[in-house]
Amino acid sequence: MSGTLNKVMLIGHLGDAVKMHYFDGGNCVGRFPIATNESYTNRQTGEKVTSTEWHNIVVRNKAAEICEKYLSKGDLIYIEGRLKTRQWQGEDGATRYTTEIQATDFTFLSNKAGEGNPGVNPGAQTSGHSVNKPMQSGNVQENVPEEDDLPF
């Protein structure tokens, strides 16, 4: 195989509201963190261990505006995208790096029904800049494996 692949798929909870940055020409970027959890039972102690991994998500233009409008801290979301590492010079002159997920597709998984958001479809899928048909309620959540005692 001569090609390469850079693809990330995550289901997690927003750790903060979407932070928007607007540019000349009408373009914008939204950034927000999501948390994914891994839980397992330690075989030696029988203790349940949970670790949280934080991911920095970047969405652009119309997708960013949709996220800003409908997402809030704690909401569950499915994200597809690719890894991108950026570098910049810090105020102290040191070179800094960050790795982000550049979102290409996402699906809102939190149920917003009855929370004063008419027109919000909690199962709406977004691909790039357009909203596609809604998913069957709970499809993605039903595919999430049950917790087990495996440490990976």
Image (spheres, grey):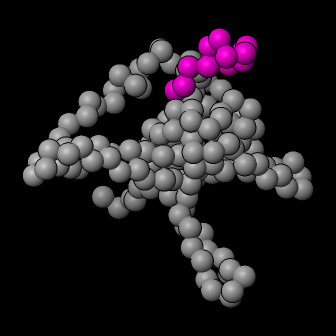
Q: Quadrant of residue 128?
A: top right
- The reply to whether residue 82 is visible in this rendering is no
Q: For residue 114: magenta?
A: yes
Magenta stretch: dominant secondary structure: loop
- Please name the residue shown 65% across and 35% down the image: 72
Which of the pair 18/107 is nearer the observer? 18
- Please name the residue shown 76% across and 48% down the image: 20
* Residue 69 % position (x, y): 74, 32
Which of the pair 2/73 is nearer the observer? 73
> Is 85 left, or right, of 116 in this rendering?
left
Q: Can you name the residue that lies furthest to the left here?
A: 44
- The reply to whether residue 43 is visible in this rendering is yes
> Is 44 left, or right, of 145 in this rendering?
left
61, above or below 145, in the image = below
- Please name the residue shown 14% across and 44% down the image: 46
Please tell me how many numbered marks the rendered image carries: 0
Placement of the N terminus among the 4 image quadrants? bottom left
* Residue 83 % position (x, y): 50, 58
Q: For residue 1: magenta?
A: no
* Residue 34 % position (x, y): 53, 46
> Is 14 left, or right, of 65 in this rendering?
left
* Residue 21 % position (x, y): 79, 53
Q: Quadrant of residue 38?
A: top left
- Please name the residue shown 48% across and 46% down the image: 35
Q: Which residues are magenta?
A: 109-120
Q: Can you name the residue that lies furthest to the bottom here?
A: 93
